[in-house]
Image (tube, coloured by chain):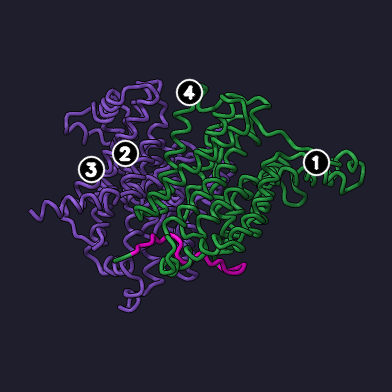
Amino acid sequence: MDYFDILISILGSSIRLSIPLIFAALAGLFSESAGVFDIGLEGKMLASAFAAACIAYTADSAWLGLLAGIGASVALGLVHGFSSITNRGNQIVSGVAINFFVSGITIVLGQAWFGQGARTPQLTSAGRFAPIILPGTDAVRGVPVIGSLYANVISGNSLLTYLAFAAVPLSWWILYRTRFGLRLRAVGENPGAVDTAGISVSWLRYRAVICAGLLCGFAGAYLSIVQSAAFIQDMSAGKGYIALAALIFAKWKPVPVMFACLLFGFLDALSNFMQGRQVPLIGEVPVQIFQALPYVFTCGLLAGFVGVATPPKAGGIPYVKER
Amino acid sequence: MSAASVQLPNWITYGLMPILNLTLAFVISGLLIWLIGESPINALVLLLRGALGNGEGVGFTLFYATSFIFTGLSVAVAFHAGLFNIGSEGQAYLGGLGCALVALALDQYVPWYVTAPFAVVGSAIFGAAWALIPAWLQAKRGSHIVITTIMFNFIGAALMVYLLVNVLIVPRMMAPETRIFLDGGRLPRLDWLMAMFGLRLGPAPFNVSFLIALVMCFLVWLLIWRSKLGYEMRTLGASPSAAVYAGVRYVRTVVVSMLISGGLAGMMALNPVLGSAARLQVEFVGGAGFVGIAVSLMGRNHPFGILLASLLFGILYQGGNALSFDMPGISHEMVLVIQGLVILFAGALEYMFRPALVRIYQNLARR
């Protein structure tokens, strides 16, 4: 295998690995822009993966699976909203609770319904989103460099992959070019001002957590009905937290979020590729280094080595209308 | 006047509300069990019998509770200083390295009671060290401690797996774990204590670290409510600006609070590593750090409350194990579900019933 082919294959798998991160990090972006911390990204993703796999299997339809995934994730988002917006509970605790609950319930229900030890049955092709071959793939395949890049990296991904990349400019547009987005960001910076203007802080924040639920739903469905063909115990495997790191690494901005997720996806792909391989001069690089790198980068950023990350000012603080 | 500012008597805030919240969490868990097609009442009976029905069950319950006391105290100490340490998980993991190194170095030469103090110090130092950077980042750079401690949980997990797989592993063995400690590196089990109550411990790994945990409860109480440092921490937690105005040194207090918190989390490792497995294994913490958050919340950040809440979660863990053994339809992970619901209702939704209780209380008081 020459170096170019290796590069192409690593790039292809980095894109595949970064899709759930992009969805989840954008979810976190919506929630945190409105001032609601969300460490339940992980749990919502896992719940969505489970619901998507269950329904995609029973109904034999990828679309219904996706819908179920989104439904489960939005429902959990509403629970998070109920505890952290309506009841002004601690948002971190609520997120931790959701993560615990989901990591248990997916296994309990999976075992009770399918009896395959927390796995859902293998999906048929109707239960999954098929790769989309972009037009002109065969025509350019022969062209050196670009042809291979187009055929193996850009084309041949699933619908959700393209949707993830479409969601990035869309999120930017919603957050920075619509009235809703302006208010959403305002409610994360200074909810008092928004309230004074006669706009409901609670309803805005609820809409933010619903958006977050929606996007996490895509992330989870991607895991179980695109990347794999079944739900596997704990299949989100910390991706929700990596997405959170990516969100901070990107300083709470949509387009940098995409690049951060691609970078972290690339690290993941690289670590898979490097497993058991020798690097000239260094020898075998331990996989754990790649696993830790996203977090090390983010901490480095937070330490101020690579610019400063300023979170939304009212993040994590419940809004109290009157004293 | 909004319901949030009405004073309720303590027995409602500290007694009735947590009980109502817990009851709701258990009712919903029961509904889930019923949905799966098992009897919730049977499940509850099996759970309680498994956790408290015999000496072995009680031993396991207390064994789990011991871990939760340490992590609960860890979260509580940071919480009093206004810091949310959700890195107890990672700090406990690193603490395991500290006490394992001590045990590996000393177990051939000295009896356990010589090793134990060094192990306590070792685990505390390693746990504290893992809290140092997030503490420093919070104090100096203002980076949110929740975020940095999450990151350090993952960095710690990667580090420990690397060390166990590549450095500490016994040569020519497959399992990524250290060698088994000799008796000099183990904490003995407390069968004599159980015997005093007429119970037989059986194979349960209830061990000396429970006594260490009780001592720590007392020391934490002393620190928070009877020392100058504790006073400074509580002032900082109540109002950072007022604390700084009053002359509390912000950076120092934040870092010291987090070091104590990390040290307590690190000591949790004594229980599973030296007290039970007698070797350092991958992922031995198993979520106890996160349970610590729930324990501390439910215990209202007071050592005595933490002790009670730890017992509750110990019962849940051991009872859940017994339940999944007796009811094959319910997998062991039901514990996680109940735990999630308890954290949700007793933690995040702790004031859900408050407005209603305020209304009832005011109506009654008016009569």
User: Is residue A224 depicted above or below B138 in this figure?
Assistant: above
User: Label for residue B19?
Assistant: 3
Task: Kindly indicate the quadrant of the structure image that contains residue B28.
Answer: top left
User: Is residue B343 depicted above or below A203 in this figure?
Assistant: above
Where does label 1 land, which residue? A134
Q: Amino acid at mark 1?
A: Leu
- Residue B53 placement (x, y as % from top left): 23, 26
Report the Cα–Cα distance between label 3 and label 2. 10 Å
- Residue A253 placement (x, y as % from top left): 60, 61
Q: Amino acid at mark 3?
A: Ile
Report the Cα–Cα distance between label 2 and label 1. 50 Å
Where does label 4 land, which residue? A113
In the depicted view, which residue is nearer to us: A245 or A29?
A: A29
| Magenta segment boundaries in residue numbering | A304-321
Callouts 4 and 2 in the same chain: no
In the depicted view, which residue is nearer to us: B8 or B79?
A: B8
